[in-house]
Image (cartoon, grey):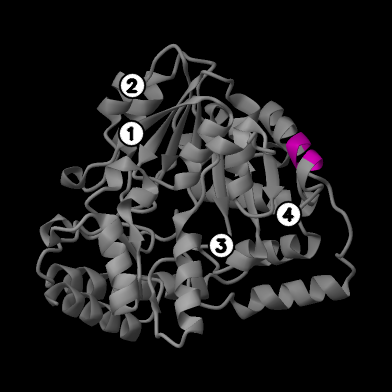
């Protein structure tokens, strides 16, 4: 029987995190206790000053349509923030505000990448990259992130993979799922590779730029000649624990921003106005709570890395950013999907198989340490006992 769905829907992927979350919730409905280490969501509440700003915005009437690219005053705030944190001179008409940061991935790929063109992307990496590349009938070209290199992207490999068909290079750092980072020297090599290519762009997913434990965040947009070749993606979900607010943005060349804003008009009309006012407060207000959150994540990182390394059959590198660990589980003798199911159904610990993030994730699990130290310790104890049985 012929499918009622358009052919393109066959290429669209998903996020396993939400699938595992659904399975875990179903088990909880049956009365089972589940420790959630599968979802990439800070377990902290949105800071009170941000919520207060949203309440005030509602009272002040920010409940109507706004410009598709975002409120002018919010875009100006974003330019000030990006100019300061990335060392570039950004302008308001280079900013597009979106409901969450993920639309920037969709819109930039949709606006720039033609059928048959190539997009380089990290693997293991955020699964939506490959999903969207396939959706526009482009060719996904994975960049393997190897454990022996601390999951750091190899710029020389990228250099070898750039061809005449290359249209976009996706970079994510600190990286989901590995917590790996990219150095300024790495970025310089990549920038030099495409310096004379006006038709190649970089999508820099910097959503975890404020959650970094060693060194400092470097943006490829800050390198000479790269600002106009970079679509910088950022948002509020991770840094400010605002996942449910759906607020993100992209900074890009003006002509690209116009096309992305046009896609916003055709899909979402605009981003919720009162959340944008809250976003202004997030960027301009006190940064004490986000800083406390990162300090707590760093404390949890030590607990989960040490705990995993004490379990027979598991070894774990220490992530340099984000709030995930990506332990090697080959010593258990199980593939990552079987082990993930085993831990969920027999130990009550929800984790993600490494292959949820691409074929190079085999032999690994992703665990989020966006949970309390108490729950992390309980989960480690359950995992150890499950592997002993």
| First-in-chain label (1 vs 2) | 1
Distance from disc 3 to disc 4, alpha carbons, whole Å, reads 17 Å
Instruction: Look at 21% across and 68% down and name the residue there.
Output: 305
Which mark is drawn over residue 161? 2
Residue at 78 percent across and 35 percent down: it is 262
Percent coordinates x, y for residue 110 in the rendering: 63, 31
Left or right of 342, for residue 139: right
**Could you give the CA–CA distance between mark 3 and mark 2, rounded to whole angstroms?**
32 Å
Q: State the image coordinates of residue 245 (x, y, percent, origin top left).
A: 66, 65
Q: Quadrant of residue 162?
A: top left
What residue did someone put label 4 on? 74
Circle nearer the viewer, 1 or 3 = 1
Q: Are marks 1 and 4 in contact (CB under 8 Å)?
A: no
Circle 3 is placed at which residue position? 237
Helix, strand or loop at mark 3: loop
Q: Residue furthest front?
A: 1
């Amino acid at each position: 029987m012929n499918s009622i769905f358009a052919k393109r829907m066959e290429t669209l992927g998903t996020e396993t995190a939400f699938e595992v979350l659904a399975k875990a919730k179903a088990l909880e409905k049956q009365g089972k206790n589940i420790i959630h280490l599968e979802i990439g969501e800070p377990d902290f509440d949105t800071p009170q000053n941000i919520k207060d700003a949203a309440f005030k915005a509602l009272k002040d009437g920010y409940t109507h349509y706004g410009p598709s690219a975002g409120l002018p005053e919010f875009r100006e705030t974003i330019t000030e923030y990006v100019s300061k944190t990335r060392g570039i001179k950004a302008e308001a008409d280079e900013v597009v505000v979106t409901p969450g940061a993920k639309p920037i991935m969709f819109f930039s790929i949709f606006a720039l990448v033609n059928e048959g063109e190539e997009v380089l992307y990290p693997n293991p990496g955020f699964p939506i990259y490959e999903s969207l590349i396939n959706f526009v009938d482009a060719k996904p070209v994975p960049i393997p992130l190897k454990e022996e290199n601390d999951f750091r992207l190899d710029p020389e490999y990228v250099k070898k993979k750039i061809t005449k068909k290359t249209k976009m290079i996706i970079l994510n750092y600190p990286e989901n799922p590995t917590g790996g980072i990219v150095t300024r020297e790495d970025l310089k090599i990549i920038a030099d590779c495409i310096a004379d290519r006006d038709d190649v762009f970089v999508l820099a997913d910097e959503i975890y730029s404020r959650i970094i434990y060693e060194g400092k965040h470097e943006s490829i947009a800050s390198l000479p000649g790269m600002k106009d070749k970079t679509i910088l993606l950022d948002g509020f979900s991770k840094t400010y624990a605002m996942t449910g607010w759906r607020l993100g943005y992209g900074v890009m060349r003006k002509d690209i921003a116009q096309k992305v804003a046009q896609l916003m008009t055709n899909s979402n009309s605009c981003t919720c106005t009162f959340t944008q006012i809250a976003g202004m407060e997030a960027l301009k207000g006190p940064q004490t709570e986000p800083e406390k959150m990162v300090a707590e994540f760093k404390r949890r990182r030590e607990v989960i890395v040490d705990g995993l390394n004490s379990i027979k059959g598991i070894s774990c590198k220490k992530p340099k950013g984000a709030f995930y660990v990506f332990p090697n589980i080959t010593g258990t003798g199980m593939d990552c999907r079987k082990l993930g199911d085993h831990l969920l159904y027999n130990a009550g610990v929800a984790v993600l198989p490494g292959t949820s993030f691409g074929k190079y994730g085999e032999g690994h699990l992703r665990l989020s340490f966006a949970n309390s130290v108490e729950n992390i310790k309980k989960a480690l104890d359950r995992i150890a006992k499950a592997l002993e049985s």
